[in-house]
Amino acid sequence: NTSIVFNESFNQQRRTISGKIMKIMDHDDVVEETQIRVSLMLLPSIKDEKSSLEVPSVPIAVPATLKRKGLASVLHHLLDNNDDDNNDMQFDFIIKKTNRLLRTSLENAVRSSGLNTEEAIILYYFPAINAPRDENEQEKLPDWVSALQCIGNDLLLSGSYDGTIRLHSNGNTIAEHSVSKSPVKCVEARGGTDNFMAAVGSLDHSLATYISNDGVSLERCLNCVGTHTNSVEATCFNRDGTMLLSGDFDGRVALWDTRYDNGNEAAYETDHNKRARKSDQKHDNRAAIKNEISSTSTWVANTQCVSGLTWSVDEKYVITGSHDHSVKTWDAERQDCLLTLNGSRVVTCLGRCSNSDIVATGHPDCTVRLWDMRVGDAKQKEQVRVSDSSLRTSHKGWISDLQWSNENPHVLATSSYDGKICLWDIRSTIPLHSMRAHQRGEKGLCVALSNKNIFGGGTDCVIK
């Protein structure tokens, strides 16, 4: 009897849902068209925070020609919510078995993936990323903006061709520091908005670190000397900002210990150490100490320019991208090359996914490529699956920079010489959004991505 009651309840629920779908579409068309059974399920990773968006996952028949917007309409009717915010919300859908975003009709997606339509197709849904709004430009800077780095959600660090780094907040420059007489090629920062360390590499071979203990000023801390004899093209801190990687135009990589100065005193406090220190000792050992340090290790990683580098997610390995067309994984301690993947194009920029060793690279052929640099970690390989080795060409110029999201391991932003910024989800080969960040004829040189904003800098000397 319990089984009968359950089946009747289930069938009643399905009839109710089907009735709602009939309201959105012409009844005759629904009957005549080919239909596919689907189960709509809220993406498991957001169930706790978005529980109000959950609908019954009972299989329902929908027209095979439905695309993303049509499914979103069905979903809105199933939600039956009078909340204006939810009514305006856009949704994206992922086919569970392929881990791909739905970007064609259901029929085409099922056919191209070879899915069995005798079973209900499970579609995960979640709120889509809205198109970024164009906000006011910051003040015009004296020279090209060559590098950007977000520090939390409130601060932005920039490097320019006039050899100056600047700290920005709410569209205004709040601090600046002259680094050298040559262009700044790369910037990197670790820490919070009120206490961080930054690394700056320049065309004149120089590499230095800077600290801020208040979030409104910059002080030179360490000069990294004795290693690079050509332009420093890329830098990357480890997670707590105690070790720094740098790569130069000659293909050399260096590792620096940024924890101590020559007097063996802490040059920079991590957030953990800062909380642990007593309030009356906060400023004892944090003054900027202008010391020279030598690299702890150095090796020739590539035959040409190291255009991008990063730590692996467990910080045991170093991943490099180069103009010699290769992407490599290195043992940071022994300087042994563990994995080499060779491409057909120069690598102009490189970035790593936030939770795995999937990396993305930009190239002069206007293409973003994805590489699986994971070394023997089966568990990690289940966290993010690469759908394609390359994303569909959407830029019309050299890809100059890319930045992964710190929150969403599938999302990244790219800048290009075509003056546009594209926002991508690697579960689709086409961008989520494409925006013109610079006037026609001006080149985009760098991009930064925070949890709230996307920033672009280029040859128009303006941060957008």
Image: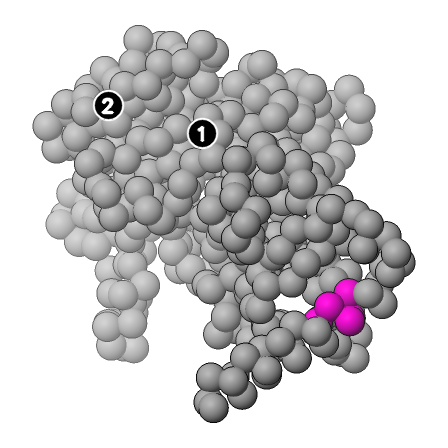
How crowded pointer 2 is (Cα within 10 Å; few <14, some 14-19, many 20+) is rated as some
Q: Which residue is mark 2?
A: 339
Q: Kindly state the secondary structure of the residue where label 1 is placed.
A: strand
Is residue 16 in sight in this rendering?
yes
How crowded pointer 1 is (Cα within 10 Å; few <14, some 14-19, many 20+) is rated as many
Name the quadrant containing residue 370: top left
Estimate the spatial distance between the alpha carbons at disc 1 and disc 2, rounded to whole Å: 15 Å
Q: Amino acid at mark 2?
A: Leu
Say which of 39 and 338 sits in front: 39
Type of secondary structure dominating the magenta stretch? helix
Q: Residue at x 58, y 78 (%)?
A: 10
Compared to residue 450, the image places residue 375 above or below, namely above
**Residues in magenta?**
17-21
Say which of 7 and 264 sits in front: 7
Q: Which residue is mark 1?
A: 370
Look at the numbered discs 1 and 2 and tell me whether their residues touch, using CB distance below 8 Å.
no
